[in-house]
Amino acid sequence: MPALVLLGAQWGDEGKGKATDLLGGSVDYVVRYQGGNNAGHTVVVGDQKYALHLLPSGILSPGCTPVIGNGVVVDPSVLFSELNGLNERGVDTSKLLISGNAHIITPYNVTVDKVTERFLGKRKIGTTGRGIGPTYADKINRVGIRVQDLYDESILTQKVEAALDVKNQILTKLYNRRAIAVDQVVEELLTYADRLAPYVADTVLVLNQALENDKVVLFEGGQGTLLDIDHGTYPFVTSSNPTAGGACTGSGVGPTKISRVIGILKAYTTRVGAGPFPTELFDEDGEALRRIGGEKGVTTGRDRRCGWFDAVIARYATRVNGLTDFFLTKLDVLTGWEEIPVCVAYEIDGKRVEELPYSQSDFHHAKPVYEMLPGWSEDISKAKSFSDLPKNAQDYVKALEEMSGAPISAIGVGPGRDETIEINSFI
């Protein structure tokens, strides 16, 4: 049975939660494989709206087992807050599994994140300030705290001491902050151990056995392709790998077991945080996209930067992820425009460039080359099939598909679970 990867093909916020939720009834496991509570997914079920940050979207699908993989960084206080909120609304969260190898976001990681970003001033990256980057840095520096460490107080204390040896020097001598006490951190982390215990598992074994037993496993990325630490618009990126390769390292499932890689594309483009954005709009069209599309970050609450669809980025996402399909979201937001610009190439130093430049400087100076496509005014939110769409909307979808390099197999025409046109089944 298939292992599917579902990920963002732009800068995140493409509507991955809606896509995962749509597939949730057909899959047995939904796995978050990277990131932390810096990601945000909005899922609308009937008249209920859910904002998820750390939990896999599959937690809203009865019968589906949600998994937080080893590649995720976990803030226990945020996790429990999110679980409490869902439990209060009648959602069963008892099937959640958390990898014992996932890393813990400690209080000092959050502190370092916030003070560092403030210290950078105009050079700041635009992090969410939730300790994600410092936690991944600790992981790479081999001074990180893993979930399993909560069950051996001696090891936990040694690891916290090792981490704070350097961090307290930085906090006190560079940032003029108070040193953080080892005992205080250890005591706080140990308070989470008992409640986490029922969820902790060897998720690598669980997922591989599930695939061997013909179960369907869906891997859900946070953020998006252009925020990937290796393949994104560095340094304005996240600290992990949202691209398809991250699904393997972040879950322990080998690449030969993945049968399909689905990229989520918004019918226009948005970005949260700093960094280059060639099609960004600063006019009434940009404000209209923001207003109609409800473009406010689920996790940060920040207004998203808005721009027209960028086919150069979409082609890049197809290439680095090996995409087999696209799920196009928020097509309904474009209703009402007489003409819709689509970025088909860039102009850099007077030359036309049709692929994403590898040079950060070139991308920073890239100017969009637009092709104008006719718009539509008809309400498309009730469309149930591709043929229900106005001709100009159909032509817009076909043009995006041709430019992006992979078939569009589903189209979102509204925020609701049932406001989706399925062209080809993903499973």
Image: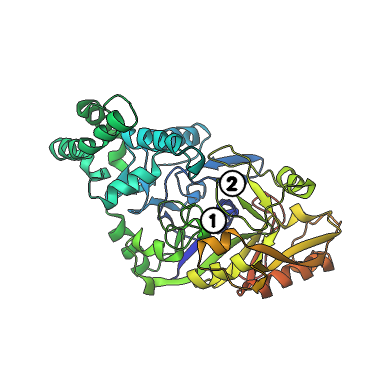
Cα–Cα span, label 2 and label 1: 9 Å
**Residue 421 in view here:** no
Amino acid type, callout 1: Thr
According to the picture, the residue beneath numbered tag 1 turns out to be 20
- Residue 108 occupies which quadrant of the picture? top left
CB contact under 8 Å: marks 2 and 1: yes
- Residue that extends furthest to the front in the rendered view of this protein: 349
- Residue that appears at 70% across and 47% down: 293
Percent position of residue 104, x then y = 31, 42
At label 1, counting other C-alpha atoms closer than 10 Å, the crowd grade (few under 14, some 14-19, many 20 or more) is many
- Residue that appears at 59% across and 46% down: 43
Percent position of residue 182, x then y = 21, 29
Amino acid type, callout 2: Val
- The one nearer the camera, 329 or 385, is 329
According to the picture, the residue beneath numbered tag 2 turns out to be 43
Tell me which label, 2 or 1, sits earlier in the chain: 1
